[in-house]
Amino acid sequence: MTSLDPVTLAVLKGRLEQIADEMDATLYRSAFNPIIAEARDACHGLYHPQTGATLVQGTTGLPIFVGAMAFAVKAVIDKVARDGGLEPGDTFLFNDPYDGGTHLNDFRLVRPIFRDGSLFCWLASVGHWLDIGGNVPGGFNARATESFQEGVRFPPVKLFRKGRMDQDIVDILAANSRVPVSNFGDMNGQLNALDLGERRLAQLLDEYGDETVRTAFDAFSDRAEAMMRAAIRALPDGTYSFEDFLDNDGITAEPLTIALDLTVSGDTMVLDFSRSSKPCAGPLNIAYSTAAACCYVALKHVFTEVPANAGCLRPITFVIPDTTLLGVKPPKPVGGYTETILRVIGVVFGALAKADPARATAAPFGTINALSLAGHRTDGSRWVMFSFFGGGLGGNPETDGLNHANNPISMATIPPAEILEAAYPVMFTQWALRPDSAGAGAHRGGFGAVYEIEALAAADVFLLGERGVFPPFGVSGGQPAALNRFTWQTADGEASPPLASKVTDVRIAPGQRVRLETPGGGGYGDPATREAARVARDVRQGLVSEKAARETYRVAVDATGRVDEPATRALRAATRGEAA
């Protein structure tokens, strides 16, 4: 194999990533659904022709999709191996969460790229479609006990054969959605992204030659493997265990354990989740491919310098038994997968923090709070508003956590209030940071948010969230953040869900409101060592109460909002058991 010089490799890396980035941008600009168009709940990439392994990903796509898409492409490869008949112009469509998917709303389109009659690679696109049937508009059914209650499930099927669309498949898709026009628009946006990617890749291959680009693919993966092995080698050998909990499965109040035993041995790592809870009745299960994908995301957050392709996973062994809720088979419900993968990412962070305290990061807010409002407009047409919401990220050895950020599973953005108000009969009456929601610490967590939404038409309300019972944890002496809280107005006053973070079968009248108060991130380090002036600044900005400043941070603030130096010295001396 001919080696390539570093300059050529760098140029090809940039050009290939640009192809994926352009595919992302094409879909963002053409999708009908705000969750793709505004929140960027989508991803594109290039994948190995025989294994489906990730070759190149863009810089803006959803990282959890990048990890899962290798399994998705492999599902198509396996189908072709069984059935044969792969030809130029074919495009496969599917959303099977147990075979390379995540949950039913996420539709994958996979296309083979041929050069001179031979398969060169695969292009793939995934995006979150707004509604695909099931018992609950939007698909986030907190009380689902099997996947049939979450929507329609498609195995890999040929949407295009030799460049011609199979209209029967499109008709089936339309018949199984409350908002078929939205889904049709998103599907065409994905197809346009694949078309553009195919053109751009052909231009690159014509310019550099197939063999040169193929050699670059191998070099990228080998470099990622070498860098990941070096990062693991820098950790002390040993087994590091960590566990965290999900509030419940939406059916009963029993908590669910996500437990990890992480073993470092030389330049290899084993992630063993065998001690996690068994498959649950409700929709908090995930499949093996999803669990492996979120471990990939967690490792990329910690080892930021390692390139993002399949090579970085070569030194990693996953132990994810199907006797746990992290490796389920059909028809176990998986609609709440986002909540579970956030907890998996958190326990990877926690275990690695034990291996290397210098990398310790407190827990992020850890829930997407999948909130759906749905109803009928005055003209009788159906509307379904789905959105996710922000919270605080965890404190770390260097900085405070980010306020009102998105979770570490994504590069997605929180949909703007103006876009949601324009698309649906709702009005946001509050959108603000949530005081005292951040976990206290020498570096505190970021603050969560308060969202209050008034329905302008009668609406059914559904929420699939977490962190209503178990708060985001702090590390190295940092404190946990505030719990998640959801309420809604009724004729008899304010109501809250019995299971803390999950709601079904709630209906509000025009003029009534729902209110979501999201957690902050956990804190890092002893709060009593935080710089007093920074605590006073948070008090002046209304983010930390005077009570919390005094009782948690041991900082006294005077009437002007400045540090009362003598009182603060006395408080902190008392905490240390010293005389002021």
Image (tube, grey):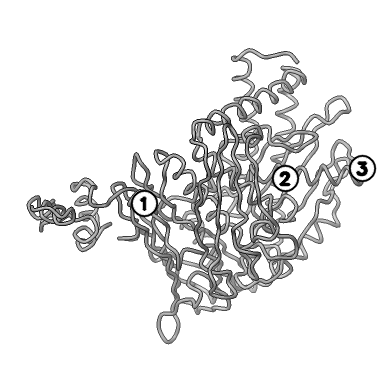
- Mark with earlier residue (2, 3): 2
- Find residue 70 and report its horizontal and vertical position in percent: 71, 42
From the viewer's perspective, is 521 left or right of 562?
right
Of 239 and 496, nearer the camera is 239
Q: Which residue is mark 2?
A: 71
- For image coordinates 52% across by 63% down, the residue present is 246
Residue lying at the far bottom in this picture: please name it: 492
From the image, which quarter does the N terminus lie in? top right
Q: Is residue 444 visible?
A: yes
Q: Which residue is mark 3?
A: 84
- For image coordinates 77% across by 32% down, the residue present is 121
Q: Which residue is mark 1?
A: 446
- Find residue 106 and report its horizontal and vertical position in percent: 67, 54
Give the foreground label among 2 and 3: 2
80 w.r.t. 372: above or below: above
> What kind of residue is marked 2?
Phe
